[in-house]
Image: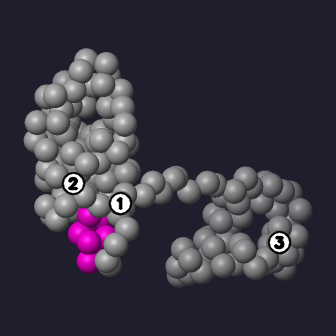
Amino acid sequence: MDIAKELKAFDTKNRNFYDNLTALERKDFSNFLMIRWGATVTGSADIQQWYLMATNQRLNKHFFNINSKTHAKLHWLMASTVSPGMGTQRHEWIGMKKKEAGKNKIRKFLESQYPMAKSDEIDLLIKLNDTATIKQLAKSLGLSAEQIKKELT
């Protein structure tokens, strides 16, 4: 499947696109990838906001409650409602955020120590402090060496 071909059909609201796919193309077609690509466009802030919000409202909420194998055409028809009908757009891929190894335990520890902190504040604490500093914080809070090892490594 050619993603450019899919996105052109997505933007132009081509309701017959799925019907015109060959059996092999239907096998390669991925509704999930269509959502990932379709939600993000370049251009004005208004058009970017439109695509993101429309994708969230129309596809992300209950999209996977519908079986994609038996109702792939319905998925396509739902996806074709996202575009505001303003021509083709340049869509961008935004990959999944990569997790840093060992940061989950540190994050959980900091979240337990600072329950009122926002997620971005916890991120900043992790970025500004190395593991040794956070272990020192745990020690100053009265955690034993065994507890620190269990919670932070």
The three-letter code of the residue at mark 2 reads Asp
Asked whether, in this view, residue 117 is left or right of residue 74, the answer is right
Q: Is mark 1 on a helix, strand or loop?
A: loop
Q: Earlier in the sequence, mark 2 or mark 1?
A: 2
Q: Is the magenta stretch mostly helix, strand or loop?
A: helix
For the residue pair 31 and 119, the one nearer the viewer reads as 31
Mark 3–mark 1 Cα distance, whole angstroms, equals 40 Å
The three-letter code of the residue at mark 3 reads Asp
Residue 39 percent across, percent down from the top left: 32, 58
The three-letter code of the residue at mark 1 reads Arg
Residue 80 percent across, percent down from the top left: 16, 48
In the rendered structure, does residue 49 fall within the stretch colored magenta?
Answer: yes
* Residue 104 falls in image quadrant: bottom right
Q: What element carries label 2?
A: helix
* Residue where numbered disc 2 is placed: 11
Q: What residue is rendered at 14% in x and 50% in y? A: 13
Magenta span covers which residues? Answer: 46-53
For the residue pair 93 and 107, the one nearer the viewer reads as 93
* Residue where numbered disc 1 is placed: 90
Asked whether, in this view, residue 65 is left or right of residue 146, the answer is left
Residue 136 percent across, percent down from the top left: 86, 75
Q: Earlier in the sequence, mark 3 or mark 2?
A: 2
For the question of whether residue 115 can be seen, the reply is no
Q: What element carries label 3?
A: loop
Mark 3–mark 2 Cα distance, whole angstroms, equals 46 Å
Q: Which of marks 3 and 1 is nearer the N terminus?
A: 1
Q: What residue is rendered at 80% in x and 55% in y? A: 153
The nearer-to-camera label among 3 and 2 is 2
Q: What residue is rendered at 71% in x and 64% in y? A: 106
* Residue where numbered disc 3 is placed: 130
The answer to whether the residues at label 3 and label 2 have Cβ atoms under 8 Å apart is no
Image: 74 above or below 11: above
